[in-house]
Image: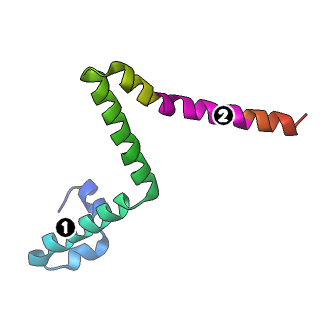
Amino acid sequence: MAPPDRQRRQADWSRYVPPAQRHQILLRRFVLRSRSLLLRRSTRILMAVLLYLAICFGLVLWGGASLGMIGLLPLILAPAIGYLAYWLVWSEFHR
């Protein structure tokens, strides 16, 4: 019998699949779940931000420190400016 954590990962129907086909079916299920995870909008945004950070830090490490820091400014300033705009609009309508 498999350990409890492995039992939770497998669905109930996987016990009834013949052992010769089980690996192939579970692998296909894993591929489909991974693919659906990668197709999510939030995952694509995360990958784009991580790629942008990697490029900026690469510039910092390989001699373009000022260019890398300028590249990081949008990631640092955009949330602050967005919050400032939200606060200004909120305070304007609640006076």
Task: Tell me which residue sits at (19%, 60%) in the image.
Answer: 2
- Which percent across, then down, holds residue 74? 50, 33
Which residue type does callout 1 highlight?
Answer: Leu
Q: In front: 25, or 33?
A: 33
In the image, taking residue 77 as reference, residue 65 lies left or right, namely left
- Which percent across, then down, holds residue 73? 48, 28
Give residue 86's quadrant in the image: top right
- Which percent across, then down, holds residue 84? 69, 31
Asked if residue 81 is among those painted magenta in the image, a careful observer would answer: yes
Asked if residue 49 is among those painted magenta in the image, a careful observer would answer: no
Total numbered labels: 2
Which residue type does callout 2 highlight?
Answer: Tyr
Q: Secondary structure at mark 2?
A: helix
Q: Is residue 22 above or below residue 68?
A: below
Please name the residue that numbered disc 2 is placed on. 83
In the image, taking residue 84 as reference, residue 36 lies left or right, namely left
Q: Is residue 89 above or below residue 20?
A: above
Question: Residue 27's mark?
Answer: 1
In the image, taking residue 87 as reference, residue 52 lies left or right, namely left
Q: Is residue 60 above or below residue 10?
A: above
Which stretch is magenta? 73-86
The quadrant in which the C terminus is found is top right
Instruction: Give the main secondary structure of the magenta stretch.
Output: helix
Task: State which mark lies toward you, 2 or 1.
Answer: 2
- Which percent across, then down, holds residue 38? 35, 58
Give residue 14's quadrant in the image: bottom left
Q: In front: 14, or 61?
A: 61
The quadrant in which the N terminus is found is bottom left
Task: Tell me which residue sits at (48%, 33%) in the image.
Answer: 75
